[in-house]
Image (cartoon, rainbow, N blue to C red):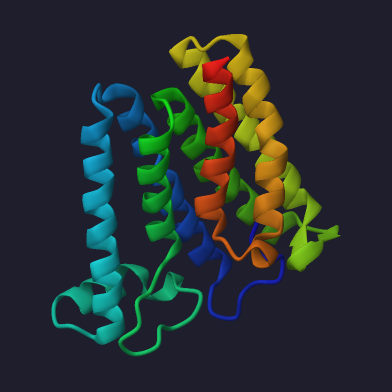
Amino acid sequence: MAPDTPHPQITYFEELKRKGIHLSSLWMVVAIILIPDWRITAAIFAVLLVITLLFEHAYACNWPVMAPMYGFFFRKMLRKPPAPGAWIVSGGAYVLAAALLVVILYAPLAAAGALAVMLTGDAAAALVGRRFGRHKAPNNKSYEGVAAFIVVGAVALSILFAVTGAPCKFYFAGYLALFPAAAAELFEKQLRLDDNFSIPLIVGLALQLAFLL
């Protein structure tokens, strides 16, 4: 859930582009379901994570070729300019790190559901919160954003489970997990853990427990 007051460096249009990239990462949900060997999926995510971190560091260090490429696509979407030589750890890197971890830790359906909630719910919360947020929640966020996260996350889980023929226990576990996941995003600042990373772990754990029952 992004702050309701537009960030001085990020317009709503840039926020739309950020969340569009977020939603484009739903290919990872499809990959987890369709690729039969989780080790192949994990290897893909690991390689992409390394490439992302290298490009982000290249941008901070102003390396030739790599820095202009990264800046052309993502400079306006960065929440703040990087310190020279710093390692930028963007939301995209956290998404890939979370994807890698849930694939290793959880069953495929649990991992796919965890990422589906984070990618769709987070995008909905940010966009709804910035445009329609009227009732202030902690950390300069909105309860409209919280509601959007829960509703859209539930829809994403419902579609995934319907397509894969998951039993009812997955629906129940997934819907319950949306509330602590929303809290993790709402109190991201206090937890000091990026919500792109914490949300998949929370939802994935709940779905994994349902898988084991």
Dividing the image into 4 quarters, which one contains the C terminus? top right
56 w.r.t. 171: above or below: below
In front here: 206 or 145?
206
Estimate the x, y position of residue 101 in percent, counting from the top left. 39, 44
Estimate the x, y position of residue 199 in percent, counting from the top left. 57, 46
Q: Is residue 14 left or right of residue 60?
A: right
Q: Is residue 178 left or right of residue 40?
A: right
Estimate the x, y position of residue 190 in percent, counting from the top left. 69, 66
41 w.r.t. 99: above or below: above
Furthest toward the right, the residue is: 135
Question: In which quarter of the view is residue 109 placed?
Answer: top left
Dividing the image into 4 quarters, which one contains the N terminus? bottom right
Question: In which quarter of the view is residue 84 placed?
Answer: bottom left
Q: Residue at 65%, 72% (x, y): give it.
A: 6
In front here: 37 or 26?
37
Estimate the x, y position of residue 31 in percent, counting from the top left. 30, 31
Q: Residue at 34%, 37% (x, y): give it.
A: 27
Question: In which quarter of the view is residue 5 placed?
Answer: bottom right
Q: Is residue 105 left or right of residue 145?
A: left
Furthest toward the bottom, the residue is: 84
Q: Is residue 86 left or right of residue 167?
A: left
